[in-house]
Amino acid sequence: MKMTIKKWALVSVFLLAIILIAIPVNKMRGDKKIIIGGKNFTEQYLLAEMAKTLMENNGFIVELKTGVGSTIIRQSLLIDQIDLYYEYTGTAYTVYYNQSDLNVMTNRNMCYEWVKEADAENGLIWLERLPFNNSYTLMMRKEDAEKLGIFTISDLSRHINKYPENLLIGINAEFWERPDGFKALMKHYNFKIPYNRIIKMESGLAYKALREGQVSVSMGFETDGRIDAFNFTNLEDDKSFFPVYNPAPVVRKNTLDRYPEIREILKPIVEYLTTREMQKLNAEVDIQHKQIEDAAVKWLKNKDLL
């Protein structure tokens, strides 16, 4: 009995030592909490998941809040409901600040510096931008574009002005209203299509609708892997309407002051995530139906970032 008591005493002391040692570590990890937001399309889910994985790999506890539109995610950052998310330069310039200078919005350096300086006054810090440009695009099936002789948005505008009931346009609700969206594009290119020829749907469904012939023209994003896979063609923006859309992590200043290491943790993504790499990642999810987390982690490991 005495030996048993001694053994239990030793075990108890050992366990207590472990607990005492563990408390500061857990407290430290618990203090390093961060909320990462994201919008409601594949690329945004992937960027948020990459950031989450890298942050967790550096001792952070991360909560994801993804799947919302631009206005909501922006407001969430401003009112401190999230700490950071990946925003696009063109969206900030045209939507949040309602700017329309073509010299700025079509120049990646000027646009980035403009929004970076403007947002600093709101306590928001733009970290290094990624190299790819996920600009909006209008797409058609290649065979239809060739048959109708539509290769540019100017060609499309001439066709619609001549045959206003001939085509159906698939877009999401946000793209219809935003200042760099379809209503503004019609004005820029001097055409108008009857409202009943506009079909509004989720962004992902627009690709499916175009592929299946439910619409004739669809909005899209240049980094989307489905463009090549589905044999679509992008109509040339020959009058330079669409702004540049380079994404960058936008972080609340108080968050970055508290965790300045965020800048270096997320920086490696900038070196590797080109337009082609983003297209392949998007295709893995949208065409090969891989899970967001699996695709993001695999990419990070392939680039030796984990």
Image: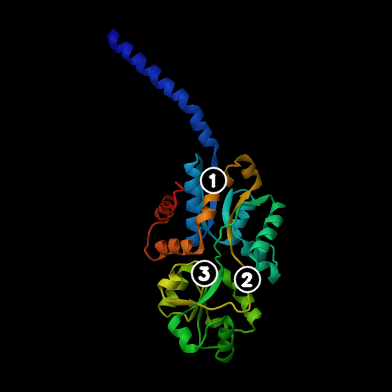
Residue lying farthest to the left in this orientation: 1
Graded by Cα atoms within 10 Å as few (under 14), some (14 to 19) or many (20 or more), the crowding at tag 3 reads many
The amino acid type, in three-letter code, at marker 3 is Glu
Residue at which label 1 appears: 265
Q: Nearer the viewer, residue 306 or 15?
A: 306
Q: Earlier in the sequence, mark 1 or mark 3?
A: 3
Q: CA distance from mark 2 to mark 1?
A: 32 Å
Vertical placement of residue 191 versus 114, above or below: below
Which secondary structure lies at badge 1?
A: helix
CB contact under 8 Å: marks 1 and 3 = no
Q: CA distance from mark 2 to mark 3?
A: 15 Å
Which mark is in front, 2 or 3? 3
The amino acid type, in three-letter code, at marker 1 is Ile
Give residue 251's position: percent from left, percent from top.
Answer: 61, 50
Q: Is residue 202 visible?
A: no
Give residue 66's position: percent from left, percent from top.
Answer: 51, 55
Disc number at residue 180? 2
Residue at which label 3 appears: 222
Q: Is residue 244 visible?
A: yes
**Residue 284 left/right relative to 25:** left
